[in-house]
Each structure stands twice: as structure tokens, then as C-alpha cells.
Image (spheres, coloured by chain):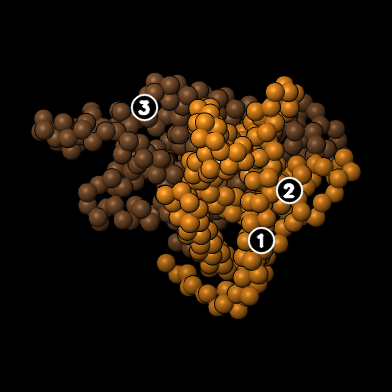
Chain colours: A brown, B orange
Amino acid sequence: MVRIFGLDDFILLLVGLQWTVLIAAVAFVGGAVGGLAIALCRVSPKRLLRLPAKYLIEIFQGTPLLMQLFLVYFGIGILGINVNPWVAISVAYTCHASAFLGEIWRGCIQAVPTGQSEAAFALSLSYRHRMRYIVLPQALRISLPATIGFLVQLIKGTSLASIVGFTELMRSGQYITNATYQPMIVYGVVGLMYFALCWPLSFWSTRMEHRMAAASR
Amino acid sequence: MTYEFDFSVVWDNIGLLLDGALMTLQLSALSMVAATIIAVVTLQARTSRIAPARWIAIGYIEVIRNTPFLLQLYFFFFGLPSLGIRMSPNTAALVALALNGGAYAAEIMRGGVASIGKGQWEAGFALGLKPLQIFRYVIFTPAMRAIYPALTSQFILLLLTSSIASAISASELTAVAQRLDSVTFRSFEIYFIATAMYLIMSSIFTRLFNLLDRILFSYPIR
């Protein structure tokens, strides 16, 4: 039975959008914690911390997100743990976000002038205090445009969860297309929803970048 | 842990996977070239004096950059046939990848051109260079040097993005892996090797781009 795209379908898409936002939010929060750890390892003076973090980032940046999803998805199954798709996907996206945010934030930590941490060292602040009060707050400010930019990438990346079989916005769109045979309208609406989510963030990120560039000139 | 790894499935079908990898390389290399051409045209329109051309370029760039690639792919493969435009999965994948990469590359190039001040033109002119020489030595090479790292990492991203083309069963590496998986059920082993292949391909491209960087853009300028 073929039906016409209507209000019910739109509401179904909104439910899917909810899941898209939720995956992105979980991955971003988890990725922020993991990313900070990776970034700190990456700038550590100890090789034993620096090198593994470096290789981890290289592996995640050199392989497709889709493959990472597949590997985590089936990898957890191999470990003998009963996989709830939601958990598997959260783990996969969190790992992905950790690696990318780790690399972005490494650059930002290194962009803070060395004089800052030397001064902190001269004041005999401990490593923790030096990072907590001197380096990280300045790095955070530098990192905002790139971090928001990555959040946009992450939101778009959540569409791949539909390939692994998770029902978020993209998958809802596929279901409705199969029921209505109106791919142009359905994918058009789905596209508008992603756009409405991503564009304000992109805009904000670009504007911040321009303002910072102007300030440092 | 009771799982026993069995990579024999992979070794038996390694030819298929390598064929898939070759298709991935072709698909991404072709789309890199096409994306560059699209980006140059878009950049012309983006900086044009004709307002509608500018609006179209901005609209194209913003729409592509703020929607998922998977959606763009579905739009070309499932949406366009209802307008009478039909493409094979491989063609649709190539078109989608080229348009996607083109939008990003155009933004990157815009940054590069903006980094070359107007004074450069004037200085080149004052030194008695011909317009083509000014473009080649004073504008193009420094601009390319400035955007080269961003542009090439965008190209590598294009290689990785091509795996999404498996969703419309284009015949590249990920699609081959999925087909093998559905026959043999050795998911982890197959995807593990496929992932390793992607890693190798992207590091080959990285090396290649670095080499080109050293040949083309090293100081002193020849």
C-alpha cells in the first residue's frame, strides 16, 4: 500500500531526529573526556604515553568511520557481551570522537605560548595546577571553532548508524521512503532537518574563527 | 572468551577484496580530480561580481557541508530517478563524492586566494613580470602552498568517505566486504582486514602527497 507523505511521517522523522541528537550528544560528551585524556598523553614528555596516543589517532583518522562502526559492533559481540545496538553505537562514536577531539585539542594545547607554562613552572605550580589554571583555559578558547566544526562532522556522521541498523533520522527517512515512494520529498525533508541542526553550528564556528583571526592580527 | 578467529575466509577471498580496494582507489582518485575542477569553478562563481552566481555557489557549499554524505548519496541514487535521471551505483557514487569534495575544496581554496594580498599583484607588475608569470609565480604557487595541507587531508577524507558508497552497493571495498560477510558470517575478520586495507591506502596517499609537497613547493622557488 502506498501512502502520501503527511504529518504522521513528519512526526516519525522528528522522533528519528531525537535519536540523531542523542547519539551525537553522547558521543560528544564521551569524546570530550576521552579526547582530553588523549590530548594530554599526546603532549606528555613521556614517550610511553605520547606514542600510543599518536598511533591511536593515526588509526582513527586513517580509516573510514563506517569501518570503525562495523569493527566495534562485531568486536563487542566477539567478546561475548550481549550487544544492545544502542550501547555498541555509543561506544563506537565515543571512540571516534575521542581520537578526533584528541588531535584537535593537542594542536590547541601546543598553540598556547610556551612562556605561559614556563612561567607557571617558575611559580612552582604542579603539573595539575599548571594545566588546570594556566594552559587548558587558554587552549579551550583557541579550540572552540574547530571543536564546534567537529561537532557538525559528528552530527552528520551519526547518519551512518542507519547502515548498522539503528533507527535514527536517516533510517526513519528510509522507512518512510519505502512506504510512500516519494524519495525526493522525504530525503528533502530529512536534509532540511540535518541542515537546521548543522548550519547554525557551522555559522557560529566560522564567525568565532573570523573574530579570533581579527583579534590576533 | 570462546570465539575462535578464522582468517582463512579472508585469505580465500583476498582477490575479491583487492579488486574492491582497487575500485576504491579509482573511485577516490577520479573524484579528487573532479572535485578540484568543481572547486575551481565554484570559487570563480563564489567571488564573481554577478550576485546570482555568488548565491548559487554559497547555497551549494552550505548545503553540501551541512548535510550528511549518505543523504546526498541517497538523493542522487534514489531521488533523481523520479526526475528521470538514472545513474548506475558507481556513477552515482562518483557524482556524489565529486560534488561533496568540490564544496569543501572550494572553501579551502577561497582561504588560500584570500591569503594573497593585492599588493602581490602590484609588486609582480612593478618587477615587470607578465600577467601569466605573476599568476604562476606570485599568486598560484604561494596560494597552493598555503592550502596544500588542508586540501590533501580533504582528499584523504574523500577516500575514507567513499566507503559510504557501499550503501548503494557501488562495487568498492566496503561493499565487497559486506557481500563476503553476508556469505561467510566472519564479520570481524573481514572488516578487520578491510579496515587495514583502508589504513594502508590512506597512508600511501599521505606519503604521496608529502612527496609532491616537497617536489612542488620547496624553497627556493624554481
Contact between marks 3 and 1 (CB within 8 A): the answer is no
Q: In this picture, is B200 found above or below A209?
A: below
Q: Is residue B222 left or right of residue A48?
A: right
Name the residue nearer the viewer: B13 or B95: B95
- Residue flagged by tag 3: what amino acid is it? Arg
Question: What's the CA distance linking mark 3 and mark 1?
Answer: 41 Å
- Write the residue at 80% across / 55% down: B88
**Residues under labels 1 and 2: Cα distance?**
13 Å
Answer few, some or many: residues within 10 Å of disc 2's Cα (few below 14, many 20 plus, some between 14 and 19): many
Name the residue that disc number 1 marks: B26
* Callout 1 crowding tier (Cα within 10 Å): few <14, some 14–19, many ≥20: some
The reply to the same-chain question for discs 3 and 2 is no
Label 3 or label 1, whichever lies nearer to me, is 1
State the residue position of label 2: B95
Query: How far is mark 3 from mark 2, CA to CA?
Result: 38 Å
Is residue A147 visible in the rendered image? The answer is yes
Question: Which of the numbered marks, if any, corresponds to residue A141?
Answer: 3
- Which corner quadrant holds the C terminus of chain A? top left
Rendered location of residue B134, percent (x, y)? 56, 38
Question: What x and y, as percent, mark residue B90?
Answer: 74, 56
- The quadrant of the image that shows the N terminus of chain A is top right
| Residue A65 marker | none
Subunit that carries the residue with mark 2: B
Residue found 45% across the figure and 34% down from its top: A146
Callout 2 amino acid: Val
Left/right placement of residue B6 relative to residue B168 reads left
Label 2: which secondary element: helix
Q: Secondary structure at mark 1?
A: helix
